Structures are given as structure tokens and as C-alpha cells.
Image (tube, rainbow, N blue to C red):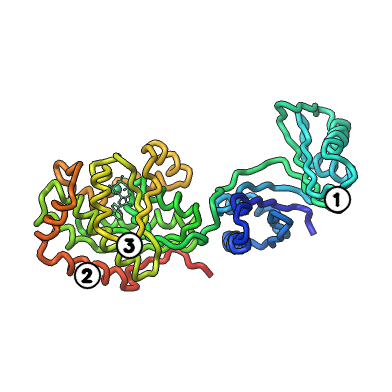
Amino acid sequence: MSNNTIIIRYGEIHLKGKNRGVFEKKLINNIKYSLVDITCKLVVDRGRYRIVDYDINHQNQIVEKLSKVYGIHSISIGLISKSDIDSLSIACINGFGGGSFKVETNRADKSYPLTSYQVSAQVGAKILNSCKDSIVDIHNPKHIFYIDIRSNDYSLVYTQIVKGQGGLPYGTAGRGLLLLSGGIDSPVAGYKISKRGLQLVAVHFWSYPYTSVQAKQKVEKLTLILSNYCPDISLYIVNSTNLQQAIKQYCDDEYIITILRRCMLKIAKQLTIKLNLDCIITGESLGQVASQTLDSLNVSNNAIVDIPILRPLISMDKQEIIEIAKEIDTYQTSILPYEDCCTVFMPKKPIIHPTRDRAILNENKIPNLNELIDEAVNQTLQTTNQKIVKQLN
Ligand code: ATP
Ligand code: MG
């Protein structure tokens, strides 16, 4: 059996008290699912997990996959060693090409006969003796050898700590409906909120032929990218053409976006109930555009009651959002130049401070609004409209 191992540390679950078992179980399942295509084994090792029994050629791929699993704080590629100084030194020297270094030791098992400091000093001395171009530098070393003494029998030795996603295991915070537009913001909103454990179903409002087939494909691509983080995410497409035409025909020009937002939320609310979800998520950020002023958000909120609307980006600047979009790899897809349905029906001068009363007056001008909404919901729920991007097994 190889002594290669990948060490997985988890973060916030430590705070979970009595519920910790539930979170751990979910995290283990999510880790296993992320590695389902790779032959390997997960072992539980007191307060952390390890991957063992894998082909060394898959090592980087495993780390890459684990780096997208919520709830993991950090990851290291390491070696399993015996806990005596000679074995630990050999594990450190293995593959070391020289240069400045330091050794940092941690003892999980305090019954080990040497202190952490003594282990670091003795292993450091052996490395110095064996690698002629090496030098100890405590303050600014090029290489750090981390020694984690798990017990008198075995230790872990590693040199790098890769940052994980953090957050909470996917699927531990309920399920929500993400309004996914194809722009930069909403995929980031989905990413941010699912990182807190919320499971996602996505919905896109599509007004063909005013918006193109490519616009829909773009949203499918974004959903696929999000599935790296949210493995079971699926996408529903709402055909909003009739609704948008009616809004354009009957409503005051400056209220078109306000009414469209409210109608989207009314449809989203029905879908949320029918799909047994707990909340709605949007990519809105305070003051970003006319439809995202406090008054606009308030008039939107008034369209539905009893379902929470979460806006994970509410306090974020566009630049901050763009940076996350680049990190999670949605940015290049989001900026593809295919029109969103809102852009096509954009009024000349959207209202910045709408009121609920005028919104309702405008809605009442549309003769069959409720039917249009129900029709959109029913069409959407036909199974052919749902695109399962990946299926959890
Ligand atoms: P985004 O970059 O997400 O498109 P935006 O800054 O362009 O956001 P708006 O177009 O005003 O903002 O949309 C605000 C939010 O409304 C979006 O973040 C998204 O959650 C939702 N939304 C807008 N258009 C659609 C759509 N066609 N389908 C689904 N949701 C939408
Ligand atoms: Mg948009």
C-alpha cells in the first residue's frame, strides 16, 4: 500500500455542537460524490479526513475536485510516516531539492515522548546533514515541512496547504430557487449562498424570439459551471414571452422593469411552493441599477409574501462581484453578448423610486395577468422544460 495521502481539514463544522454529526455525514457524502470518478478511499482520522489508496497520477485532480467542496477548510498532499525521527526525516527529505527551510511540528498525541520543538530541531538537523544546499530560515523559508504527529505509530508529513472553499456542506441549509439571468451577478449570488449550505434549483426567464437560443445555452452553461459546486443543480426555463409582451403593451414605460420583476417573483413563488423549496435567491446589489434601489427592492418584495428572498450580493460592489465570477469561472460565459430578456424590453427611463400603489395600478391594466402567470408556471413544470445538468446518484 502506498504511503501517499491527501489530508482534508474542515472548518466551521467544529462549531456545530450536537448537530455536528449531521454536517459531517453530509460533508463525507459530498466529498465521496466529488471523487466518484476516481478510484480512492476516504478515511476518517480524528477531526479530519484523508484520501488514500489512489493512483498518484490522480493526485492533482483529486485536490482540484476537493477544492470545490464546501465545508473543506484546507487540503494538503502528504505522506504517511512512522513517528520516529529517522522515518520523519526521510519523509521530509524525499523529493526535497534543497534551499531554505523550516520544520513545523504539531502533536495531536501528547503522549509522544518528544516536544514539538524537539521534533522540529532533530528532523531539521537531519535534513541539513543530508541535503547539502539546504539552510534553515525560521522567518522566511522557501520550504516548510509540516509534521503532524497523529500517534506514536504514525504521522503525516506535508509541505503545502491549499485553501478550501470554507462555508458549510452543500445541502445542510435547505433548498432555494436561484433566479439565474445569464449576467455576471446571479451566478455569483448562487455560488455565495450555496456556500452556506443551501441546495439550489435554478430558473431562467426566457423570451424567445426576443432573446436567442444562444442566450438560453449561455444560462445552461452557467448552470453547468455552478454544478462544480452544487452537484445536483438543475435548471428550469420559464417562457416569459407572452408575459413580457403584455407588460410592454399595457404598462407605463417607466414601470416595465418594476412589473416584470414583480411577475418574475410571483412565478418564482409558485415554483418554490410546487418544488417544495424554501426561499428565492437573486443577484441584486443595492443601488446597482434603477431596479435595485431600496424603493425598487421594496416594491419587488411586496409582490410576494411568506417566501424569503435572499440577496447575497446586496452589499457588494460590481468589481468585487466580477472578481468572484472570475474565480469560479463564470465570468467569461456571463460576458458573452447574448441579450437577456430584460435588456430587450428595457424602458427608455426606468423608474428609480417606484411605489407599490402605482405598481399595482399598472398590473391591474393587464387584463389576464394571473392567467399569464399560471400559464408560465404550468409550462415550466412540464418535465421537458427542466434540464437536469448532472444527476446525484
Ligand atoms: P445579472 O448580472 O445577474 O444579470 P443584473 O445586474 O444584470 O444581474 P438585473 O438584470 O436587474 O441585474 O437582474 C437582477 C436579478 O434579477 C438578477 O441578478 C437575477 O437574479 C434576476 N433576473 C434578471 N433577469 C432574469 C432572467 N432572465 N431570468 C432569471 N432571473 C433573472
Ligand atoms: Mg441581468
Residue 360: x and y in percent read: 15, 56
Residue 209: x and y in percent read: 20, 58
Q: CA distance from mark 3 to mark 1?
A: 58 Å
Q: Quadrant of residue 291?
A: top left
Q: Quadrant of the N terminus?
A: bottom right
Q: Quadrant of residue 26?
A: bottom right
Q: Is residue 285 above or below residue 68?
A: above
> Is any part of residue 35 visible from this angle?
no
Q: At 47% from the left edge and 47% from the top edge, which residue is drawn?
A: 328
The label shown at residue 8 is: none
Residue 315: x and y in percent read: 38, 41
The label shown at residue 82 is: 1
Closer to the N terminus: mark 2 or mark 3? 3
Closer to the N terminus: mark 1 or mark 2? 1
Which residue is more in the foreground, 151 or 35?
Answer: 151
CB atoms of marks 3 and 1 within 8 Å: no
Image check: 138 left or right of 304? right
Number of other residues with Cα within 10 Å of mark 3, as a class: few under 14, some 14 to 19, many 20 or more: few
Number of other residues with Cα within 10 Å of mark 1, as a class: few under 14, some 14 to 19, many 20 or more: some
Q: Is mark 2 within 8 Å of ligand 1?
A: no
Q: Label 3 belongs to which residue? A: 306
Q: Label 2 belongs to which residue? A: 375
Closer to the N terminus: mark 3 or mark 1? 1
Look at label 3 and name its amino acid.
Answer: Asp
Image check: 352 left or right of 279? left
Look at label 1 and name its amino acid.
Answer: Lys
- Element class at badge 1: strand
* Eye-nearest disc, 3 or 1: 3
